Image (cartoon, rainbow, N blue to C red):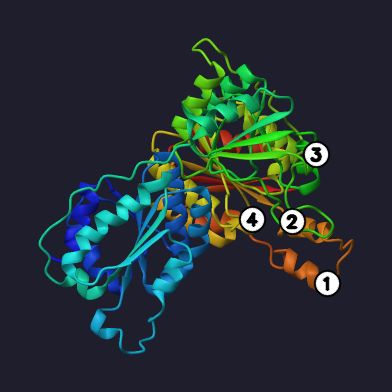
Amino acid sequence: MNGAESLVKTLLNNGVDTVFANPGTSEMHFVAALDAHPEMNCVLCLFEGGTSGAADGYFRMKRDVAGTLLHLAPGFGNAFANLHNARKAGSGVLNVVGDHAIHHLRYESPLKGDILGISQSISHWTRVSPDAESVAPDGAAAIRAARDRNGQIATLILPADTAWDPATGPSASLPGHALTRPSNAEIDAAAARLTTANAVLLIGGNALFGDLRQLAGQIATKTGCRLVADTLIPRIAKGAGTAKIDQLVYPVDPKIAQLENTASITLVGTDRPVAFFAYPDKPSVPEPADCVMAELCTPTMDIAWTLQALADAVGVRKDTAPTCFALDLPEMPTGELTLQKVGLALAALIPENAILCNESVTSGFHVMPPTATARPHDVLSGTGGAIGLCLPAATGAAVACPDRKVIALTGDGSAMYTVQSLWTMARENLDVTVIVFANRGYQILRNELTNVGVESFGRNAQAMFDVESPELDWVSLAKGHGVPASRADTMDDFVRALSHGLESGGPSLIEVVCP
């Protein structure tokens, strides 16, 4: 047994059975070790940003970690943007990064780089294994770190000789560290605060779906407080039967209006809301100046215990019913294609228990609202603002939940960052229906230029905002990656294509030409 084999066995001993990989020469012994264990699910991604984004989407749905296999400093650098999104989402990701053999590091070889420095700028936990005997225990420690505090980024750097040198054997799993909890006094204070006028309970993390979402709804019913979610959240349950919740919008002025007259905000499983960017003469935070901001439970604390303790403190009983969204499916729209009609068709056709990965940005403002009363489903969205998450996250979600339909909503500019994920969807025959909104540019940037006070722009700004001349042909791009595709110019085209995609068992893509 060598170091690489001891690590693979350690991963399996610890319940990590999926690796999203983009290996290189330094990882060949690890590849050989993976090959010796067919029970390990190895998913090839053609770009490292696809591996990190897929591991993020996998964790959001599986609630457990997957591994990534990355090649040296450039490979880790390519994975960085979606690791940033994963960190902001609180996702647990285990990165295994190959490095040059220790004796080779004294030379300035072409791929030599500061992996440790890059990793420490984004990872919560980083370790370089010094020898083959350390690889297995380091691996067990990395897995524990990735699972700790509700999910962290853990990076294990393996010099090539630590992978090929002899090792004794794998390591057993390590017990996780207990989550911290607020004090009883803090619970009692929060319970009293939520019963006062204009109180908000702002929830995040795993409080946004499943039984905890309903429990939060019961707390809102009992206290009369307003239940709210932030703008960019990792995962949220939506549709019929889910406890009603208000979600903060992206633009600053409407976000401020949403919290107007709010007297207090109690945070459970989330950070304080903040404007996405700073703008001239606009505040960085949306709540009123005299609003009480109370951090009861951070995203890394025991969210489930906190919500249950809070429910007990306010007197929630089993028969306390949360106010829920009712099922209200719209009539199927026809005729001219508009984004509003696309949203209605999507809401009418979403299968129960589907997963929506949403990075449609500007188009989503019009498309997403009708889905609030669709059949129950989950929505994954960008959390760190680094675009290029949707297609990899949809890939990871489909791997994690092969029995659920996945729908990916993305803008054309965003999708180009990680278009290679289409190939992985085809290779793995993943049940993902991709909808690309072709607005032929970075529409969000046009809006942001206005937000900073620029009323008009000329040739240079326009050239940086559009993706025309030539136009992207998403039907050809998809087919070139092995994914069947069609273009929707009318609502009949879109409904037909979406229905067909959802009925099939593999990937498909619809290009929606935005009006």
Q: Residue furthest front?
A: 185
What secondary structure is marked by label 4? Answer: helix
Q: Mark 1 sits on what residue?
A: 459
Bin the neighbour count of mark 1 within 10 Å (Cα to Cα): few under 14, some 14-19, many 20 and up.
few
In space, the residues marked 1 and 3 are separated at their CA atoms by: 35 Å
Q: Residue furthest top?
A: 319
What secondary structure is marked by label 1? Answer: helix
Question: 290 above or below 276?
Answer: above
The numbered dot on residue 443 is: 2
Look at the image and tell me whether residue 39 can be seen: no
Bin the neighbour count of mark 2 within 10 Å (Cα to Cα): few under 14, some 14-19, many 20 and up.
some
The numbered dot on residue 412 is: 4
Say what amino acid the circle numbered 2 marks. Answer: Gln
Question: 426 above or below 460?
Answer: above
Tell me what residue is drawn at x 74 percent, y 42 percent. 287
The answer to whether mark 4 and mark 2 are in CB contact below 8 A is: no
Query: Residue 227 location in percent, x, y?
Result: 64, 29
147 left or right of 186 in image: left
What secondary structure is marked by label 3? Answer: helix
Q: Nearer the viewer, residue 31 or 510?
A: 31
In space, the residues marked 2 and 3 are separated at their CA atoms by: 24 Å
Along the polypeptide, which appears first: circle 2 or circle 3?
Answer: 3
